[in-house]
Image (tube, grey):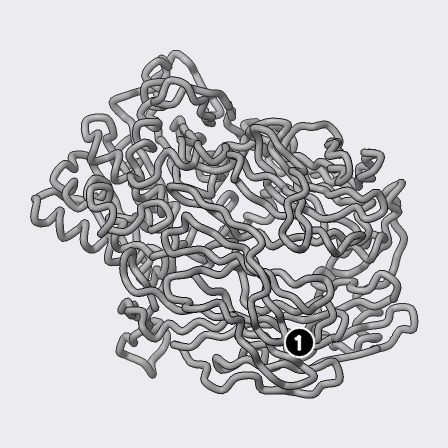
Amino acid sequence: MGQKQFTLEDLNFGGKNYRQMIPKNQTLYWWGDKLVHATDSVCTLVDVNTGKEKKLFTLKEFREWGELGESFRSLRGISFPYADKSLALAYTGAQRVLVNFRNQKVEWSQDRSKETQASEWNKRSRAVAFVDGDNLYVRDGEGGLMRVTKDGSPDIVYGQSVHRNEFGIAGGLFWNPAGTKLAFYRMDQSMVADYPLITVPEITDSTHRMATPAPEKYPMAGQTSHLVTIGVYDVAKGTIVYLKAGDPTNRYFCGITWNPDGKTIYVQQMNRAQNDMHMVSYDATTGEQIAELYHESHPKYIEPGAPLQFLPWDANKYIMQSEKDGFNHLYLYEANGNFVKPLTSGSWEVTNFVGFDTKNRAVVIESTEAGDLQNNIFRVDVATGKRTRVDADGKGVHSCSLSESGVYAVDWYQEPNVPRNIDILNTATAKAVRFFTAENPWKGYAVPEYLCGTIKAADDTTDLYFRMVLPPDFDETKKYPTIVYVYGGPHTRNVEAGWHWRSRSWETYMAQRGYVLFILDNRGSNRRGREFGLATYGQLGQIEMQDQMKGVDFLRTQPFIDMDRLGVHGWSFGGFMTISLMTNYPDVFKVGVAGGPVIDWKWYEVMYGERYMSTPELNPEGYEKTSLIHKAKDLKGRLQIIQGLNDPVVLPQHAYSFLKACIAAGTQPDFFVYPGEPHNMRGHQSVHLHERITRYFDDYLK
């Protein structure tokens, strides 16, 4: 009997059977140094030394104790905020509830019905800050409601992400440790131009016939950007002060950190060119500047954003992350800004500061030290700097969460042939206890072969990593149509030592249909150090294309690659790369599919665009060289462009402008729009999208 074949309903994240086809996972929470395993129906306490479990409570019991009702359907969303109390925090649509599962009753509850735009809860004071109707509110632990602002509007944004989510910014509300003062972003974007997105009525909506405006505040490279300030609200006094950071024009504020005493705020302040950063401390009561603690600059750009980490056992010292020595590492400073020493160093990256082992006065990090394609867990002794790897076998891609003291960690990891394992680690002894081993969800299916290797970059020096996916019935004597899947931009890498070398499921689907897939991480991609990333500065797409063409040269050496049937596909930056390759090498690539493509960087947003390209005024040659508008005339092969009509990231103007240029040049791309969709297609529409991409290659490449 033959092996089963995959469908897009199996492999695509919007597919009906997708959740059955990915490696199973487990939901684990720390309750101090105790570990809780949550399923929909039961929570168990896990022995960290043996992995054995015993029942803590069931969903039925928790509903009854918490007076939650039948609408509360799963225990997976609860948490255990207090190490010394038997309290579980649960959310319903209208309430935040602390359930005492020892006394079997509700201990505390809080209304959350108005938390519509953003919220942040503090476990010590039990106060919550939230945004509703564009204005900022605080509800204290006793239920008292305070309106903090009155001028919020689509133009005046409070307490939410600013600077278009760059610089590590994911929110805009920052409680001090005690929950008595709240720092928050205020963004005035009234001066930023509106991009005219529209909302198309639903087909089933008989009451609205006309499309309606849905404008997006979008500052393009070189244009006027928004103004951000940082306010501090004193809950007891009901007063606001704003940090006196001077003129906020053309500056970015990130890495907001409270001193453990809750009286001082630290802010990373960066110029608009993003090549000069100052770390400044402020008095949270008066807003006055206290001192400049650190300064870093670079001729091209720097990428700050990670908040400071104060030592739990010494509040007069903090850890800062920086790429100043060429790779992202940790540095120890005194609270007054005096440098103490580097905590980590080497030609590898700290990828995540996980937390502190307070008992042994160490930090726990994730890093690429064990291998460029890996992510492993290390313990670093603060006094000596000694690093000890604490994950089980030193392979694969790991991520972990620490217990409150940092003595234990849960380690989720994959390897190229390991779908998912979960270990409980002792960070001091490196002892690992296996808690979960996921079965291979693709057992019984015709699975491709996944290969990983290296080639030299166009500089003939730098190693680049690639992944190749071969059909399940691969025959090296045959010639196969081949698709280069490309991204190539900053902050992303496609090839990792995870399951199947982190292959995208669409690659598996296409390999099953008789294609070879080739994926290469060029210079400019992530986690290879500062110089590896800086190589593309000021001319995005150029070095990347040179490296991708070295990948094409490698493909030419493989006897099973049909170079007359070579395609390329990518999304976003990868869409930009797809059209770049199709038009700069029109005799090489026969078919391409470009999703949400950047066409000209002068139409991209300020923060990302100016970091890597400067401004059109200061770098006219770079913008001219990288623009695809004047390359429309060079299109020869079959190119399909796919665009979300409501894309607020890569605006539809990019695709429309390229189409207009193709019309003028007499070239013939194909075009497809997803009405109402943003930068990536959501839900089951993603299945439709990947079926469309597949059909295009089947029609013109296969």
- Depth check: 576 or 434 in front? 576
Q: In this view, does 448 lie to the left or right of 422?
A: left
Identified at 47% across, 27% down, the residue is 467
- Depth check: 625 or 661 in front? 625
Q: Can residue 436 be seen in this view?
A: yes
Identified at 73% across, 27% down, the residue is 393
For residue 289, what is the image quadrant? bottom right
Q: In which quarter of the image is the N terminus?
A: top right
Q: Where is residue 108 in the image (x, y as percent from the top left)?
A: 80, 79
Q: Is residue 290 above or below residue 33?
A: below
Say what secondary structure mark 1 lies in: strand
Q: Is residue 653 above or below residue 379?
A: below
Q: Where is residue 90 in the image (x, y as percent from the top left)?
A: 73, 70
Q: Is residue 683 visible?
A: no
For residue 371, what is the image quadrant? top right
Q: Is residue 584 above or below residue 435?
A: above
Q: Quadrant of the C terminus?
A: top left
- Depth check: 360 or 401 in front? 360
Q: Where is residue 75 in the image (x, y as percent from the top left)?
A: 74, 63
Which residue ends up furthest to the right in the rendered image?
103
Identified at 73% across, 55% down, the residue is 316
Q: Would you name the residue on which mark 1 appears? A: 128
Identified at 26% across, 55% down, the residue is 603
For residue 51, what is the image quadrant? top right
Q: Residues within 10 Å of mark 1 (few under 14, many from 20)?
A: many
**Amino acid on which disc 1 is placed:** Val
Q: Position of residue 267 (x, y in %)?
A: 55, 60
Q: In this view, does 272 lie to the left or right of 2?
A: left
- Depth check: 424 or 68 in front? 424
What is the count of numbered marks?
1
